Image (tube, rainbow, N blue to C red):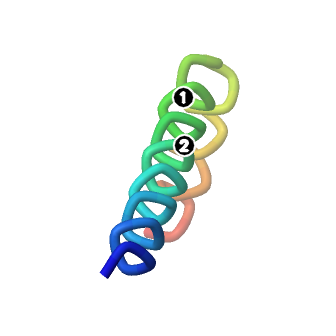
Amino acid sequence: MNGIRLRRGIGLAAAGLTLAGVFLAYLDPHLAVELANRVWGCF
């Protein structure tokens, strides 16, 4: 039972760190504009 809790905790920590990294990446305005231009270019 302890192993399952440990795996779940590690998984949640990894997901949280990934989300934090994505949110921090969007703080760079040049990146946000570049991504918006790429998405807009698909249409």
- Image quadrant where one finds the C terminus: bottom left
The location of residue 30, given as percent across then percent down, is 69, 23
The location of residue 24, given as percent across then percent down, is 57, 25
Label placed on residue 7: none
> Dot 2: few (<14), some (14–19), or many (≥20) neighbours within 10 Å?
few
Q: Amino acid at mark 2?
A: Leu
Which residue is found at the position 54% from the left and 41% from the top? 22
Which residue is found at the position 37% from the left and 69% from the top? 8
The location of residue 20, given as percent across then percent down, is 50, 35
Query: Which residue is the site of mark 2?
Result: 17
- Total labels drawn: 2
Q: CA distance from mark 1 to mark 2?
A: 14 Å
Which residue is found at the position 67% from the left and 32% from the top? 31
Left-right relation of 28 to 5: right
Front residue of 39/9: it is: 9
Left-right relation of 2 to 33: left
Secondary structure of the residue carrying numbered label 2: helix
The location of residue 40, given as percent across then percent down, is 47, 55
Which label's residue is closer to the chain start, 1 or 2? Answer: 2
Front residue of 42/18: it is: 18
Query: Which residue is the site of mark 1?
Result: 26
Residue 5 against residue 17 in the figure, above or below = below
- Image quadrant where one finds the N terminus: bottom left
Front residue of 20/33: it is: 20
Judge depth for marks 1 and 2 and give the one in front.
2
For this orientation, the residue located farthest to the front is 2
